[in-house]
Amino acid sequence: MSRDLIERAEALKADLEGKVRTFEVPELGERGKPLVIHVYPITTKELQRIIGIADAIERAAMSIDVRAKDADGRRIFINERQDIMRGFPPALILKIARRINEDMESLFTDDGAIDNVDGIDAAGK
């Protein structure tokens, strides 16, 4: 790969990393303040962890576990997928995961397979 191409890819990654979304989850707040979740652009490693799980609720819990971060970019949950699945109502898991994964909705088919990434389908066309 040419150095120029690598530099352009690194610049794109840096630009994407600067695009952090936030949203509030009043149900998980404390002292009258909602929990604020910060969502950074998904990394390849995070995507691999999430799509490796077949069950929708488990995948949603993994999304929360892997992608929910505080204002400093530290994960709020660390390897707590099972605790999330046991302790959170399913509707809340899906609600939070849906907000976290807004940037991924166009990537997957209904069966969880990668569908389309920037106009390239799963076959690479």
Image (cartoon, rainbow, N blue to C red):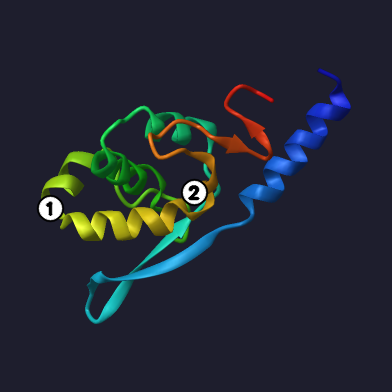
Residue at (41, 47) in percent of width and height: 67
Residue at (31, 74) in percent of width and height: 34
The one of 51 and 76 positioned closer to us in this rendering: 51
The one of 38 and 105 positioned closer to us in this rendering: 105
Residue 116 visible, this angle:
yes
Say which residue label 2 marks.
Answer: 105
Considering the numbered disc 1 on the image, is that residue within a helix, a strand or a loop?
helix
Considering the numbered disc 2 on the image, is that residue within a helix, a strand or a loop?
helix
Under mark 2, the amino acid is Glu
Under mark 1, the amino acid is Gly
Crowd band around label 2 with a 10 angstrom C-alpha radius: few (<14), some (14–19), many (20+): few
Are dots 2 and 1 in contact, CB under 8 Å?
A: no
Q: Residue furthest top?
A: 1
Mark 2 to mark 1 CA distance (whole Å): 25 Å
Crowd band around label 1 with a 10 angstrom C-alpha radius: few (<14), some (14–19), many (20+): few
Judged left or right of residue 68, residue 47 is: right
Say which residue label 1 marks.
Answer: 87
Residue 65 in the image: above or below residue 33:
above
Quarter of the N terminus within the rendering = top right
Residue 70 visible, this angle:
no
Residue at (40, 40) in percent of width and height: 110
Q: Position of residue 69 (x, y in %)?
A: 41, 53
User: Which quadrant holds residue 100?
Assistant: bottom left
Residue at (22, 79) in percent of width and height: 31
User: Where residue 4 is drawn, which disc sits there?
Assistant: none
